[in-house]
């Protein structure tokens, strides 16, 4: 290509074409070198970030296992499930504040971890709402595998249209929910954000009647803009509450109700 360009230019410019072609070629090579260097640097930065992030999650996961000493393998963490750093945060909160009643919006690995923690402390129950019967079954089996019957319960709660502050949301049907005592800790990790914008907003307005005074609300995926809006809206609607962002892998919001 460069030789062809040189020959064409030579027709018009004579011997000067060699210098122009060589100059163009040098510019092109310099451009390629700079681009590949930038690409390599970007790749390296991403890899360093990923290695650091994996280390943080491994460290948290080791802490979770060392603290709870599960008698069966824990279900997977991360991706669809809570990340290890959120699970560690939950364990720390439960050990410090010893909630008697924990309510979860969605079920899975976190239900097992909370159940194990309550079992270790010798008091408390966790009830998880689950909209998907298939995953409700998987979590129920995990509860049995970890000997948590009587401590952890999954309640079938299909999503149904519900009106909250004049807007309609597909949200968990609460008709089968029966808590022994008002929840001191509410963990919100569903429904999936693909269902609707602000999909998790109804949790606090619709569950307020099931929460104890001064209850703590933990909202997972706090790094997402919807969850940020939801947390601030909850705080504004509950004057006297204290809102805090937890810088975890997926980010989380902690709201202490008055
Ligand atoms: C964001 S996930 C989080 C669930 C839970 N907080 C946890 O940490 O595992 C929410 C949904 O994932 C689904 N889920 C539960 N168990 C699952 C599994 N084993 N595999 C894939 N999805 C699952 C359930 O429908 C659940 O409501």
Image: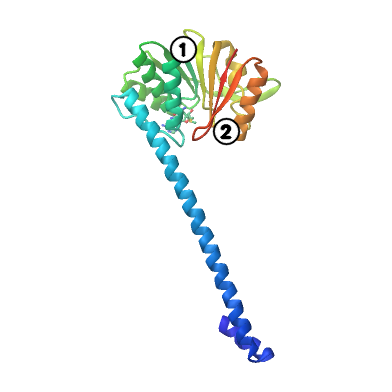
When the figure is inspected, residue 219 is found, relative to residue 7, above or below; the finding is above
> Does dot 1 land on a helix, a strand or a loop?
strand
| Residue 101, position as x, y percentages in the image | 46, 12
Horizontal relation, residue 212 to residue 107: left or right: right
| Residue 70, position as x, y percentages in the image | 31, 24
Question: Distance of mark 2 from mark 1, alpha carbons?
Answer: 26 Å
| Residue 174, position as x, y percentages in the image | 54, 16
Q: Who's the residue at 48% across and 10% down the image?
A: 179
Q: Which mark is residue 226?
A: none
> Does dot 2 land on a helix, a strand or a loop?
loop
Q: Which residue is mark 1?
A: 101
When the figure is inspected, residue 30 is found, relative to residue 44, above or below; the finding is below
Q: Who's the residue at 41% across and 40% down the image?
A: 54
Q: Who's the residue at 61% across and 77% down the image?
A: 24
Query: Residue 201 versus residue 238: which sits nearer the camera?
Result: 238
Query: Residue 71 versus residue 85: which sits nearer the camera?
Result: 85
Q: Which residue is mark 2?
A: 193
Horizontal relation, residue 168 to residue 84: left or right: right
* Mark 2–mark 1 CB contact (< 8 Å): no
Crowdedness of circle 2 by 10 Å Cα count: few (<14), some, many (20+)? Answer: some
Q: Is mark 2 within 8 Å of ligand 1?
A: no
Can residue 76 be seen here? The reply is no
The answer to which quarter of the image holds residue 136 is top left
Residue occupying the far top of the picture: 181
The answer to which quarter of the image holds residue 151 is top left
Crowdedness of circle 1 by 10 Å Cα count: few (<14), some, many (20+)? Answer: many
- Counting residues from the start of the chain, the first of labels 2 and 1 encountered is 1
Q: Who's the residue at 61% across and 79% down the image?
A: 23
Query: Residue 247 versus residue 238: which sits nearer the camera?
Result: 247
């Amino acid at each position: 290509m460069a030789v062809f360009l040189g020959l064409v230019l030579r027709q018009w410019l004579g011997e000067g074409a060699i210098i122009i072609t060589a100059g163009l070629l040098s510019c092109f090579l310099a451009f390629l070198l700079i681009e590949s260097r930038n690409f390599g640097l970007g790749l390296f930065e991403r890899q360093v970030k990923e290695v650091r992030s994996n280390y943080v999650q491994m460290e948290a996961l080791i802490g979770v296992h060392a603290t709870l000493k599960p008698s069966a393998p824990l279900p997977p963490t991360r991706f669809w499930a809570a990340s290890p750093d959120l699970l560690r945060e939950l364990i720390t909160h439960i050990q410090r504040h010893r909630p008697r009643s924990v309510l979860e919006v969605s079920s899975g690995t976190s239900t097992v971890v909370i159940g194990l923690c309550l079992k270790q402390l010798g008091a408390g129950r966790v009830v998880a709402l689950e909209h998907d019967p298939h995953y409700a079954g998987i979590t129920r089996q995990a509860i049995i595998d970890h000997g948590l019957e009587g401590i952890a319960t999954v309640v079938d709660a299909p999503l149904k249209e519900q009106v909250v502050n004049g807007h309609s949301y597909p949200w968990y049907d609460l008709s089968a929910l029966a808590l022994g005592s008002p929840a001191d800790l509410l963990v919100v990790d569903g429904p999936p954000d693909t269902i609707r914008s602000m999909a998790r907003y109804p949790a606090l307005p619709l569950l307020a009647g099931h929460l104890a005074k001064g209850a703590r609300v933990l909202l997972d995926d706090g790094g997402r803009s919807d969850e940020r809006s939801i947390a601030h809206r909850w705080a504004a609607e509950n004057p006297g509450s204290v809102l805090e962002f937890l810088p975890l892998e997926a980010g989380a919001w902690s709201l202490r109700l008055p």
